[in-house]
Image: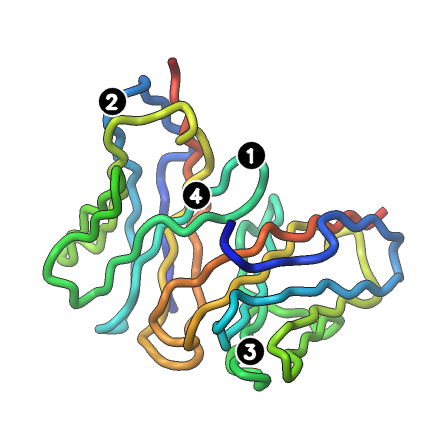
């Protein structure tokens, strides 16, 4: 158990809908990262937050947004969902957001039908 | 831009034997970190081992060791005394130079199967 929690574990929704994925980092970690894992694209970095502020952006679509709250939990919002958004979404956390290890949560499996 | 290449889509090893999973990387940054993660069939990503580009010695963590050859830009994972529970997908990853915008670039992964 990495100490990072993600909810829900599974999510099935229809195209055009909006969903919110939630992540709680390990105790004491200030940095949260979101990744998407799909069969065709592999594992891709989406976005990073550090202590409530956005710090780095990767291949995140405009339909996706995220935020980190004062209690350090983070939410990833996915809107106008398409079939291709079906993937495993991971949240990871690290102590500082620098060159330290990232610990991953169990992931949220999103299926868009 | 950083790139990670894992050329072995699948590997087989007999229980109790050692296995090496290959990883090569490409970057123009002088400072970087290299990571290995394990993803069992259950889906979670498990951190295994880390090597900093300026570390003088190869990293080791229990049965895992990282064979870091900087000149060749390779960071192979060696698993000694394989166990059935080692069967999983293994990802090599790289991070940019230290700082507050640290993000990981992953390879495509290698599926390791340990045979009894």
Residue pushed farthest top?
A: B116
Q: Quadrant of residue A47?
A: bottom right
Local packing at callout 2 (Cα closer than 10 Å; few below 14, some 14-19, many 20+) is few
| Residue appearing at x 37%, y 27% in the figure | B11
1 or 2: tag closer to the N-terminus: 2
- Tags 4 and 3 both on a single chain: no
Residue on which the image places disc 1 = B41
| Chain hosting mark 1 | B
Residue on which the image places disc 4 = B38
| Chain hosting mark 3 | A
Residue pushed farthest front?
A: A27
Horizontal side of residue A94 vs A57, given as left or right: left
Residue on which the image places disc 3 = A49
Local packing at callout 3 (Cα closer than 10 Å; few below 14, some 14-19, many 20+) is many
| Residue appearing at x 22%, y 44% in the figure | B65
State the CA–CA distance, disc 4 to disc 2.
Answer: 18 Å
Local packing at callout 4 (Cα closer than 10 Å; few below 14, some 14-19, many 20+) is many
List x then y, in percent, for residue B49: 31, 51
In the structure shown, which secondary structural element does the residue marked by tag 1 occupy?
Answer: loop
Residue on which the image places disc 2 = B17
List x then y, in percent, for residue B6: 36, 44
Local packing at callout 1 (Cα closer than 10 Å; few below 14, some 14-19, many 20+) is few
> Does the residue at mark 3 contact the one at mark 1 (Cβ under 8 Å)?
no
């Amino acid at each position: 158990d990495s100490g990072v929690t993600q909810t829900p574990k599974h999510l099935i929704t229809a195209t055009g809908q909006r969903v919110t994925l939630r992540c709680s980092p390990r105790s004491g970690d200030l940095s949260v990262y979101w990744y998407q894992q799909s069969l065709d694209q592999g594992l891709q970095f989406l976005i990073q937050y550090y202590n409530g502020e956005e710090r780095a952006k990767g291949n995140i679509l405009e339909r996706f947004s995220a935020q980190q709250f004062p209690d350090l939990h983070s939410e990833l919002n996915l809107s106008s969902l398409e079939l291709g958004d079906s993937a495993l979404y991971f949240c990871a956390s690290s102590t500082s957001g620098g060159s330290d290890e990232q610990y991953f949560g169990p992931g949220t499996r999103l299926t868009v039908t | 831009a950083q790139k990670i290449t894992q050329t072995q889509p699948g590997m087989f090893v007999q229980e109790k034997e050692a296995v090496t999973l290959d990883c090569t990387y490409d970057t123009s940054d002088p400072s970087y970190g290299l990571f290995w993660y394990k993803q069992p069939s259950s889906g979670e990503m498990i951190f295994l081992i880390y090597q900093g580009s300026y570390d003088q010695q190869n990293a080791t963590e229990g049965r895992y060791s990282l064979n870091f050859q900087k000149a060749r830009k390779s960071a192979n994972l060696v698993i000694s005394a394989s166990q059935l529970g080692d069967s999983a997908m293994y990802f090599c990853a790289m991070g940019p130079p230290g700082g507050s915008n640290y993000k990981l670039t992953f390879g495509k992964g290698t599926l390791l199967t340990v045979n009894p």
